[in-house]
Image (cartoon, rainbow, N blue to C red):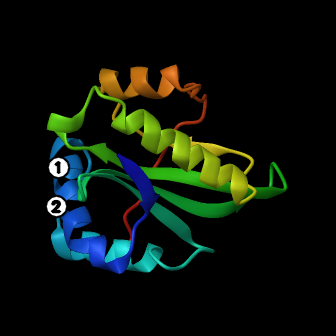
Amino acid sequence: MIVEQAGQEDVPALCQLLCTLFAQEVEFRPDPAAQRDGLLRIIGHEALGAVLVARREGRIVGMVSLLFTVSTALGGRVALLEDMVVYPAERGVGVGSRLLREALGLARERGCRRITLLTDGSNDLAKAFYAKHGFAVSGMVPMRLLLD
């Protein structure tokens, strides 16, 4: 298995993978056109973020996105970890752990001082996975307002 940054040619396969993720999340629904537009905004724009893919035998089996911003509290760059997903048939063999390690390394390399992520409150497997990798539940409460 290799982990590398995604290119524009990977977008159709990533959209399929995101459909898997958004079908299992509470607040989101698959929308391939929206996912394509979002991926194209990230891929190739290093200041904005990065999309990492895990490939096995040339096939994408998992992905994770990092989005970069600035924290005034920390006085520096921070990252949002988004869209972490591995195909169900590929889970349990280290794909997710490898993707996460690579994402953490990339964030450090890009000068990030913190990574924040959201996961469904009911997704106990995801919460245990992230805890195993050092993430802790924050006292901050996420709130959203859709603007369109």
- State whether residue 128 is above or below residue 55: above
- State whether residue 68 is above or below residue 80: below
The residue drawn where x is 44% and y is 44% is 99
Q: Nearer the viewer, residue 102 or 49?
A: 102
Quadrant position of residue 118: top left
- State whether residue 119 is above or below residue 78: above
Proximity of marks 1 and 2: CB atoms separated by less than 8 Å: yes
Q: Secondary structure at mark 1?
A: helix
> What residue does disc 1 label?
20
- State whether residue 58 is above or below residue 98: below
The residue drawn where x is 70% and y is 50% is 108
Horizontally, is 28 left or right of 64 in the view?
left
How many numbered marks appear? 2
Q: Secondary structure at mark 2?
A: helix
- The quarter of the picture where the C terminus appears is bottom left
- Residue lying furthest right: 75
Asked whether the viewer can see residue 29, the reply is no
Q: Position of residue 141 (x, y in %)?
A: 53, 37
The type of residue carrying mark 2 is Gln
Quadrant position of residue 115: top right
**Gap between marks 1 and 2 measured at Cα:** 7 Å
The type of residue carrying mark 1 is Thr
Q: Nearer the viewer, residue 30 or 43?
A: 43
Q: Position of residue 32 (x, y in %)?
A: 17, 70
Asked whether the viewer can see residue 114, the reply is yes
Quadrant position of residue 51: bottom left
Q: Position of residue 19 (x, y in %)?
A: 17, 56
> What residue does disc 2 label?
16
